[in-house]
Amino acid sequence: MSTVLTAPLPVHDADPFGHDILENPLPFHEELREAGPVVHLSRYDVYAMARYGQVHAALRNWQGFQSAAGVGLSNFRTEKPWRPPSLLLEADPPRHDAPRRVLAGLLVPRALRRLREHWRAVADDLVDRVLERGTEFDAVPELAEAYPLRVFPDAVGIPDEGRENLLPYGDFLFNAFGPHNDLVAAGAPRAPELSAWVNAQCARDVLADGGFGAQIWAAADRGDITPEQAPLVVRSLLSAGVDTTVHGLAAALHALATHPEQWRRLRSQPQLARVAFDEAVRWGAPVQTFFRTATTDVQVADVVIPGGRKILMFLGAANRDPRRWRTPTHPDPDTFDLTRDPSGHVGFGFGIHQCVGQHVARLEAECLLTALARRVETIEIAGPTRRHHNNTLWAWGSLPVRVRPA
Ligand code: OVV
């Protein structure tokens, strides 16, 4: 017989999906971290983790914290999901593994090398055109959105028509991981139409030869996945690959525009572009949260999370936990600093579900940030910035910037 010591569970009554916290989650994150290793969120009757150690451990523990019951607030066992579950994100081993292997193989750095030269040229061209139009512009539509939309859908191989649906689809999808609040209600009317369009882009006959989409279908021909799985794997690319990168790039642009000394550092050492992006994903975590569901009773620190309960993991809070990030050389986790080693951040998750597209995102960031660093001597915020509220994404709606061309 074993005895489990349990401590009283700290409680927080805030709404993590309310507009005040979506606007600026940082004070709430600190309260959660300081409240304890596991906290009960009374508003939704779920458990929460905001400290690095527990978030990291929970992300690794796919046996104890399953994904197949959904990684949003709603439990797929008791509530019908709004779309057929993802074969990657919303699945556990063994079913998760074949689709994951196929996608991972297509998206490893070695497989992306063929894209670099073209993606660099597109970034150079985009930056040139933006600068031709003037030295003040909104970095969200003009760079953070424009660049991924120029390279990623082509790389997947979807047709041109309807690409304007990609961002609204992603916005709804990431809202739908949260509660059925005003953000979900506002997006719901278009969800069926957007979803139907995305699903139609996953069919074999619409996907261009040589793209990621066609390669996923080729994997089905080889028997690595089934023909029924192929369209859903393509759907994962179109679901997870656009808004996340857009807001990761926006986080990087915001960070650099508000830290002139870090911009100078990047200008003098353009090979820091990748570090700059990962530091931005740590500091500005574009994906803030995901849920898991306890498979059985799981003990975390001195708390037992009962089987069947939802756990909300605060990736952005873990990324600034002083317990992990306060070091002798870099004592303040809240600073954006290219001399820091950001590796180990959980902005891409961790473990078997860690972002399979992270190398694609890093390549996009490398191309865009080096193109910008070559042509722009200074970049600063030129007007009021605006957040775009989403239940999962920490997003920018508008980043007016002023640049001085080099
Ligand atoms: C990581 C992520 C986010 C959203 C959707 C998916 C994955 C998916 O696989 O559909």
Image (tube, rainbow, N blue to C red):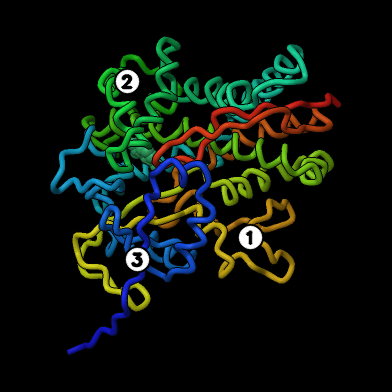
What residue type is disc 1 on?
Pro
Please say if the residues under marks 1 and 3 sit with CB atoms less than 8 Å apart.
Answer: no
Provide the residue designation for mark 3: 11
Which quadrant of the figure has residue 54? Answer: bottom left
How many residues crowd around disc 2 within 10 Å: few (fewer than 14), some, or many (20 or more)? many
Please say if the residues under marks 3 and 2 sit with CB atoms less than 8 Å apart.
Answer: no
Question: Which of disc 2 and disc 3 is earlier in sequence?
Answer: 3
Question: Which of disc 2 and disc 1 is earlier in sequence?
Answer: 2
Residue at 55% in and 25% down:
145
Residue 131 location, x and y as percent?
Answer: 75, 17
Quick one: which residue is furthest to the top in this view? 161
Residue 167 location, x and y as percent?
Answer: 44, 25
Left or right: 104 as drawn, with respect to 294: right
Mark 3 → mark 2, Cα distance in angstroms: 38 Å
Q: Is mark 1 on a helix, strand or loop?
A: loop
Provide the residue designation for mark 1: 333
Residue 39 location, x and y as percent?
Answer: 36, 65
Question: Which of disc 3 and disc 1 is earlier in sequence?
Answer: 3
Of discs 1 and 3, which sits in the foreground? 3
Provide the residue designation for mark 2: 194
Residue at 55% in and 63% down:
321
What residue type is disc 3 on?
Val
Left or right: 271 as drawn, with respect to 97: right
Of discs 1 and 2, which sits in the foreground? 1
Residue 227 location, x and y as percent?
Answer: 23, 30
Mark 1 → mark 3, Cα distance in angstroms: 25 Å
Q: In this view, does 51 lie above or below 198?
A: below
Q: What element carries label 3?
A: strand
Please say if the residues under marks 1 and 2 sit with CB atoms less than 8 Å apart.
Answer: no
Q: In this view, does 359 lie above or below 144?
A: below
